[in-house]
Image (cartoon, rainbow, N blue to C red):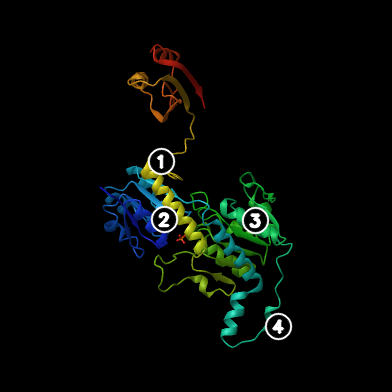
Amino acid sequence: MKMKVLIADKFPEYYTNILRKNDIEVIYEPKLGEDDLIEAAKEVDILVVRSTKVNAAAIENASNLNLIVRAGAGVNNINVAAANKKGVYVANCPGKNAVAVAELAIGLMISLDRRIPHNVADFKKGIWNKGEYSKAEGLLGKTLAIVGVGNIGKEVAKRALAFGMSVYGKDISRIEGVAIKDFDEMDKILPIADIVSIHLPLTPQTRGLFDDKMFSYMKPGAYLINTSRAEVVDEEALIKAVKEKNLRVAFDVFKDEPEGKTGSVSSPLMELENVYVTHHIGASTEQAQNAVAEETVNIISKYIESGVIAHWVNKAKITEQMYQLVVKHYDKPGVLASVLDVLRDADINIEEVENLIFDGGIVATCTMKLRKPATGEMIEAIRVNPNVLTVSHVAM
Ligand code: 3PG
């Protein structure tokens, strides 16, 4: 039977056709919303979304669902907890739209400095105001703080350096080949930053990060750009800071952003003179969407061919202490079963296991991550099997 893939957001036709050629039944329904997915995803094996919300009901109701691909970076629109409960893989396409988001962030910086949207709006109204709009400062030599230096933050850094800005970033260890300075604490960098650009994923740690306290650190008149997630900024605190500290703000995301692609919009940010908002278009260049679509096709093809999930985001990150048991053995039926018997009798759970075979197929090596340590007696019990060559056991 053909594998069924539902694409519930806009996706380039070229890549939809590649999936179809791979003997996959592709259902392309770009206008589906959160509530529609409960019915629409019911019988599909793979679901592809951009920002359309995938809630717990949609996941619970989808009896064949095995993989959700986020055709983009942030997975906060997917109820990952519900996917975990059912063993549904969630994957994303990290970095593929980073350049597009960085280009928008830089565009917003220039827009704030030159007040381009105001310029244009006045022109359309028949107002000429060269006097007022000649008051821009320029970006050369300005201090930019990049909060969140992942794929996107790094691309912003490269462009800002080319503009002659002095660039600071949090998370220096993740930046290779980009000469930007590290900073430890927000209370050190925010007071000296002329421009702050946020590039964080939405996590429990980043939700509401920009609150009254953070705004109190910011320089009066500084520029704040957010092309990441609305929830990283406390909107009430932002509005207060815009009024009290005269911040200039440009956001591509905002609270209660509409789910649909067109319609009306309402936000308290509309009332604020120095706040520009774009329509969550950071990733929406043709280049970025093609790169994301190509990666989505790669993820699906690899999964179908080998069962391996590239960019698997809901794989557990093992943080507690683990013990690694490596058993090198002749590759014969029953050898691993004897090892597992020893672990089961000791009530030890295997958290991860991988069995790889040496060239020639005579010997294999099995690596297991254990929750509890194996005792000397257990290792001996494994070793007595004549088909076991070596056993090693270390704490990790
Ligand atoms: C992302 O996380 O990749 C961006 O926010 C893009 O969202 P979009 O696919 O809805 O444009």
Where does the image place residue 265, in percent across and percent down from the top left? 44, 72
Nearest the eye: 190 or 180: 180
Q: Are there few (<14), some (14-19), or many (20+) residues within 10 Å of tag 2?
A: some
Question: Disc 1 designates what residue?
Answer: 308
Nearest the eye: 55 or 329: 329
User: Could you say whether the residue bearing mark 3 is in a helix, strand or loop?
Assistant: helix
Which residue is at a point 47% across and 38% down the rendered structure image?
317
Question: Disc 2 designates what residue?
Answer: 77
Viewer-nearest of labels 3 and 1?
1
The first of marks 4 and 2 along the sequence is: 2
Q: CA distance from mark 4 to mark 2?
A: 45 Å
Relative height, residue 324 to residue 74 (above, below): above
Pointer 2 residue Cβ closer than 8 Å to ligand 1 = yes
Relative height, residue 132 to residue 337 (above, below): below
Question: Disc 3 designates what residue?
Answer: 157
Kind of residue at disc 3: Ala
Numbered label attached to residue 131:
4
Asked whether the viewer can see residue 48, the reply is yes
Q: CA distance from mark 3 to mark 1?
A: 33 Å
Kind of residue at disc 4: Gly
Count of labels in the image = 4
Kind of residue at disc 1: Val
Kind of residue at disc 2: Asn
Where does the image place residue 260, in percent across and percent down from the top left? 39, 67
Relative side of 185 to 296, left or right: right
The quadrant where residue 217 appears: bottom right
